[in-house]
Image (cartoon, rainbow, N blue to C red):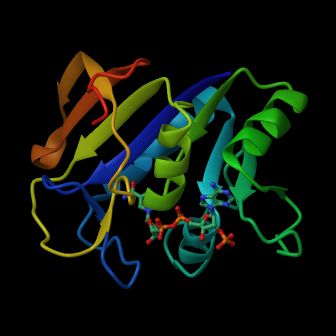
């Protein structure tokens, strides 16, 4: 399974404010997400992202023509009909595979991104950087003890000063643990 992580963030790696707002991000990032979701036809999100997006007025996951997998430890968590529930990153990928997908889009948030990275399950990372900084908020990787080395593939300058960075994940330890 090939996993592509796509995230929109501030220059200092913040993907949402502490109260789950993404109002500092341009609409261009959502379009980037939609375009990748159209390509992979399957995306995976954490339970908190699913719930945050459900409250939005102008954007929704519901109408996206893709398999939508939500990850939660809660086996009783109830989802709308078009969504599939998974209980770990591995379970999410197994469910995607059973549905016939070989490529999936991992779409946050920071906690789920970390869980995938910890298990070395991310193959590519595409980061869309908004020209702004926020001191506080939810980070792209929420746990402090995750790390990986990347190979830069491409830099694309988009409108409104947004820069998109595309990386391959190098799947080996790059620092000796003390
Ligand atoms: N800017 C962007 O590109 C972008 C993209 C996506 C999301 N976001 C924002 O990110 C925020 C949410 O991020 P977040 O880090 O707080 O939450 P999150 O990663 O979306 O969701 C966290 C939840 O996912 C489940 N989960 C995570 N790891 C798991 C694992 N290993 N096994 C089983 N379940 C697991 C747990 O659900 P349970 O508690 O139910 O067990 C956990 O509480 C939202 O504000 C959203 O808008 C921004």
129 to the left or right of 40: left
Quick one: which residue is furthest to the bottom in this view? 19
Q: Whole-percent x and y of residue 13?
A: 22, 54
Residue located at (33% from left, 81% from top): 18
Residue 161 position (above or below residue 75) = above
155 to the left or right of 82: left
Q: Whole-percent x and y of residue 133?
A: 10, 64
Q: In this view of the protein, which residue sits in the foreground, 100 or 111?
A: 111
Q: Whereabouts is ligand 1, in terms of quadrant?
A: bottom right
The quarter holding residue 176 reads top left
The quarter holding residue 149 reads top left
Q: Is residue 10 visible?
A: yes
Q: Whole-percent x and y of residue 5?
A: 47, 37
93 to the left or right of 155: right
Residue 71 position (above or below residue 115) = below
**Which image quarter is the N terminus in?**
top right
Q: In this view of the protein, which residue sits in the foreground, 15 or 65?
A: 15
The quarter holding residue 87 reads bottom right
Residue located at (16% from left, 44% from top): 162
Residue located at (27% from left, 73% from top): 137
Q: Whole-percent x and y of residue 62?
A: 70, 61
Residue located at (82% from left, 34% from top): 94
Q: Is residue 28 visible?
A: no
154 to the left or right of 39: left
**Which image quarter is the C terminus in?**
top left
Question: How many discs appear?
Answer: 0
Residue 41 position (above or below residue 174) = below
């Amino acid at each position: 399974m090939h996993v592509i992580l796509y995230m929109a963030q501030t220059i200092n790696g913040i993907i949402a404010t502490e109260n789950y707002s993404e109002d500092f991000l341009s609409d261009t990032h959502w379009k980037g997400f939609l375009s990748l979701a159209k390509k992979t036809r399957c995306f995976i999100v954490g339970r908190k992202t699913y719930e945050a997006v459900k409250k939005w007025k102008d954007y929704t996951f519901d109408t996206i023509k893709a398999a939508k997998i939500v990850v939660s430890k809660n086996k009783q968590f109830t989802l709308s009909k078009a969504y599939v529930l998974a209980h770990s990153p591995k379970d999410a990928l197994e469910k995607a595979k059973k549905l016939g997908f070989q490529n999936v889009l991992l779409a946050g948030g920071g906690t789920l991104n970390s869980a995938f990275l910890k298990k070395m399950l991310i193959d590519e990372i595409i980061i869309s950087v908004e020209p702004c900084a926020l001191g506080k908020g939810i980070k792209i990787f929420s746990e402090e003890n995750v790390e990986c080395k990347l190979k830069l593939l491409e830099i694309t300058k988009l409108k409104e000063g947004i820069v998109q960075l595309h990386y391959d994940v190098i799947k080996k330890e790059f620092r000796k643990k003390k």
